[in-house]
Structure formats: structure tokens, C-alpha cells
Image: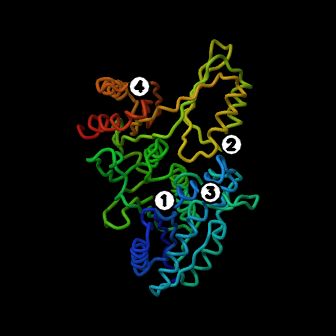
């Protein structure tokens, strides 16, 4: 047993949403163990537990402290881990559950969006050596100051990748209710297609653009550690999607996926900003743990700067306070656009020439969907459109760039 390879499996909230699903997950884990593997399992909170806990906190106060929210929200994964461990033990397969801190997941001090800086899996190794299945609460760790921290949206993925790297796992499975990564959200696009394999870079861009299937920080962690991720269905037995070092096998310039992000705020500066002003904005966002992105900076004839950036709102606590503080500090010279959503086309070399940009703007205009801003990178074309037209934009772009090619 001690020489058997280690496998890490992560199960999302939909996979452990109720007692029957937890039993199905337990049977899948047992099959893996009986195939000659030592199994470490990372679990998310059951179903919508995290949202329910967050709503309860907001009933107590409009803007709870992020420290107390971390203490509260970490409970969800602890419920899942203990119920799954109890189930496995009842089925005759000894298991032991561990919180993030007990697993040795050490993070920085940023609450609600902490980053893992080290993993010390001594207790996990000891449990595996004793012949136990190990169940770990995802999404959480302990800071270098000894505080409970959470890892942000999709943080259980990050927990799983970090543990797989620290344990030198044979492979990592991210198990959910979808068989792999699709070319669009199937709730928006009925005929979205499964993508058989993706490069780390493409998957990271999809995650940063709003795809829910994998977490961006987890993909970056996997890339650095050289760990392939198998995104697979918990219950359907499909082949899933493999995310790995496939950059040389990707067709350059092709759109692999159409991704959207609904809950965002676009922040645009007006007037001239000095370098000290700019530094002040960035420092404040960093102190608040705001995961801003798509930062654009423009020089104004060497007399100052204009800039813009996107703030994802889905996992951001205290946004109104952040908005109020920035507005006051910079005297109304920041405009917050909260009625837009972001649509992104993802693919290796997507802007090698102007065809994809021109065609995306052309088809959106033809569909009567105004475009308010556009951002590009080697792997992404992102446009900002009215939030209430975002699903329409996804469908028309998917039909043009994925289904017709």
C-alpha cells in the first residue's frame, strides 16, 4: 500500500449536493482505491451552502468583515468532508477528514482571496501510510498569521492542484456535473461542444474570462508543477477534457471557446492622473484583495495618465465600500460602469491578424449588440456589452466562430 501511486480527486458542490450523491462519490472513490491507488479527495461545500452562509451573514450586517466571513464560509467544506468520510467508513473503507489547516495548506494573509504559499502535507502522508482514504476540505487554508483563510471562487480546485503537486500525485481529477470543458456554457448554448484537450494557457484564459469549470489560480499552479488536469464528470463515465502542456499541438488562430462573465464592474478614469495617483489606486486595490484585471494604461502626452480596469464582483465582499472609498479619494474622477458584461473569445494566437477582431465586431453590430470596450491578448479577445444582451452575444459568437468552423 505504501508504494502505491497517489491520486488526487476533487469533487465540486453539485457532486456532493445531497446524501445520495455523496454515496455515489464514495463508491467512485472506492473503485479508484481498489484499482491500486492511494486516494486523496478534496471536496467543495454541498450545493449552494456557501451562498446560503453568505446570505445569512448579510442578514446580520450589510458588510461583514472578511475575517469573519472566512471563518463562516470555511464551514461549508468541513460539512462535506466529514459526511463523505463517515460514508466511506460505513462502507468499510477507512477514511479520515482534514481541514485545510490540518492538511498543511499555508497561505498569505489576504482574506477571501488568499494565495497558497506552501503545502506541508505531513498528516496526509501519515494517514495514507496507515491505509486511510484522505478527505480534505477545499477552498481553505491557514495564513502565516494563523488565521483561517479562503482561496476565492473555485478555490477548491486550487487546493486540489496544490496537494497533487506536494504529494507528487500520479494524476489529478477535477470532477463535476459536466463531462469536461465545453466550448460555451451549456446553459446558454444548447449545442456547446466538448473540447478534448486544452493547453494550460488556453484554460487559464478561459478561467480568467469567467468559465466556471476550472479555477485560474489552479491552472497556473498546475502549469508550474507540470501536473495534467483531467476535467471529468463525476457520474457519467465520460472521457472528459485533459488540460496540459499542449501548446505545440493547438491550431493557432482558432477560437476554442466563447466565455462570458456577467458580474463585473468596469472602472474608467477621467481627467489626468499622476504616477502617485495611479500607484495609490493600485495599492488600495491590493490591500483590499481585489482581483482586478484587464488593466489598460494610456499616457497623455507625458502630462499624466488615463487608465481602466475590470473588477470581478462574484467573489468580492465589500464592493460598495471599495467603490465609495475610491470615489471619495479621487474626487469623482473614476466612473464605475456596472451594467455591462464581458464576452471573451479564447484561442492560441487569436490576434495574430485582425480577422477575429473584425469579424467579432461585425457580427455583434449586425445583431444589434453595442460594443463599449475591447481588450486583447495573445489568447483572448474580450468585449464589453450590455449585460442584458450578454447571452445573445455568446450565442451569435459561438455560432460563427465554433459551429461554422
Residue shown at 68% from the left, 40% from the top: 286
Residue at which label 4 appears = 371
Disc 3 to disc 1: CB gap under 8 Å? no
Looking at marks 3 and 1 on the same chain, the residue that comes earlier in the sequence is marked by 1
Q: Earlier in the sequence, mark 2 or mark 4?
A: 2
Q: Which residue is mark 3?
A: 150
Q: Earlier in the sequence, mark 2 or mark 1?
A: 1
| 280 sits left or right of 191 in the view | right
**Vertical position of residue 115 compared to residue 403: above or below:** below
Which quadrant is home to the C terminus? Answer: top left
Which percent across, then down, holds residue 237?
31, 67
Mark pair 2, 3: CA separation:
14 Å
Q: CA distance from mark 1 to mark 4?
A: 33 Å
Q: Nearer the viewer, mark 2 or mark 1?
A: 1
- How far apart are the two marked residues, 3 and 1, measured between alpha carbons? 17 Å
Residue at disc 3, secondary structure: strand
Residue for point 41% across, 76% down: 23
Residue that mark 2 sits on: 288
Going from N to C along the chain, the mark reached first, 1 or 4, is: 1
Q: Position of residue 225 (x, y in %)?
A: 54, 57
The tag on residue 260 is none
Secondary structure type for disc 4: loop
* Residue 122 image-quadrant placement: bottom right
Q: CA distance from mark 2 to mark 4?
A: 30 Å
Give the alpha-carbon distance from disc 3 to disc 4, as whole Å.
35 Å
Amino acid at each position: 500500500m505504501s508504494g502505491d501511486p497517489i491520486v488526487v480527486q476533487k469533487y465540486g458542490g453539485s457532486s456532493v449536493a445531497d446524501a445520495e450523491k455523496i454515496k455515489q462519490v464514495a463508491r467512485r472513490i472506492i473503485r479508484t482505491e481498489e484499482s491500486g491507488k492511494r486516494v486523496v479527495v478534496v471536496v467543495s461545500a454541498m450545493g449552494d451552502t456557501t451562498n446560503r452562509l453568505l446570505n445569512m451573514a448579510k442578514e446580520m450586517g450589510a458588510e461583514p468583515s472578511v475575517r469573519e466571513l472566512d471563518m463562516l464560509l470555511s464551514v461549508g467544506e468541513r460539512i462535506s468532508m466529514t459526511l463523505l468520510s463517515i460514508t466511506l467508513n460505513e462502507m468499510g473503507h477507512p477514511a479520515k477528514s482534514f481541514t485545510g489547516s490540518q492538511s498543511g495548506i499555508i497561505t498569505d494573509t489576504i482574506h477571501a482571496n488568499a494565495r497558497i504559499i506552501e503545502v506541508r502535507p505531513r498528516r496526509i502522508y501519515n494517514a495514507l501510510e496507515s491505509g486511510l482514504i484522505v478527505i480534505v476540505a477545499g477552498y481553505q487554508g491557514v495564513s502565516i498569521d494563523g488565521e483561517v483563510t479562503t482561496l476565492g471562487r473555485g478555490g477548491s480546485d486550487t487546493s486540489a492542484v496544490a496537494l497533487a503537486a506536494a504529494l507528487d500525485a500520479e494524476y489529478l481529477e477535477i470532477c463535476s456535473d459536466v463531462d469536461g470543458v465545453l466550448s460555451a456554457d451549456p446553459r446558454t448554448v444548447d449545442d456547446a461542444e466538448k473540447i478534448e484537450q486544452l493547453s494550460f494557457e488556453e484554460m487559464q484564459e478561459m478561467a480568467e474570462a469567467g468559465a466556471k469549470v476550472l479555477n485560474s489560480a489552479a491552472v497556473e499552479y498546475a502549469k508550474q508543477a507540470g501536473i495534467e488536469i483531467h476535467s471529468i464528470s463525476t457520474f457519467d463515465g465520460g472521457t472528459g477534457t485533459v488540460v496540459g502542456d499542449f501548446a505545440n499541438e493547438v491550431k493557432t488562430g482558432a477560437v476554442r471557446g466563447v466565455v462570458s462573465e456577467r458580474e463585473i464592474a468596469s472602472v474608467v478614469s477621467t481627467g489626468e492622473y499622476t504616477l502617485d495617483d495611479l500607484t495609490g489606486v493600485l495599492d488600495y486595490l491590493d490591500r483590499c484583495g481585489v482581483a482586478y484585471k484587464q488593466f489598460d494604461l494610456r499616457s497623455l502626452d507625458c502630462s499624466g495618465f488615463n487608465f481602466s480596469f475590470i473588477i470581478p464582483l462574484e467573489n468580492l465582499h465589500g464592493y460598495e465600500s471599495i467603490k465609495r472609498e475610491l470615489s471619495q479619494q479621487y474626487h469623482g474622477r473614476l466612473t464605475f460602469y456596472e451594467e455591462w458584461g464581458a464576452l471573451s473569445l479564447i484561442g492560441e494566437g487569436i490576434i495574430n491578424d485582425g480577422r477575429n477582431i473584425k469579424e467579432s465586431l461585425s457580427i455583434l453590430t449586425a445583431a444589434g449588440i453595442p460594443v463599449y470596450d475591447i481588450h486583447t491578448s495573445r489568447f483572448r479577445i474580450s468585449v464589453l456589452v450590455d449585460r442584458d444582451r450578454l447571452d445573445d452575444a455568446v450565442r451569435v459568437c459561438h455560432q460563427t466562430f465554433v459551429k461554422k468552423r
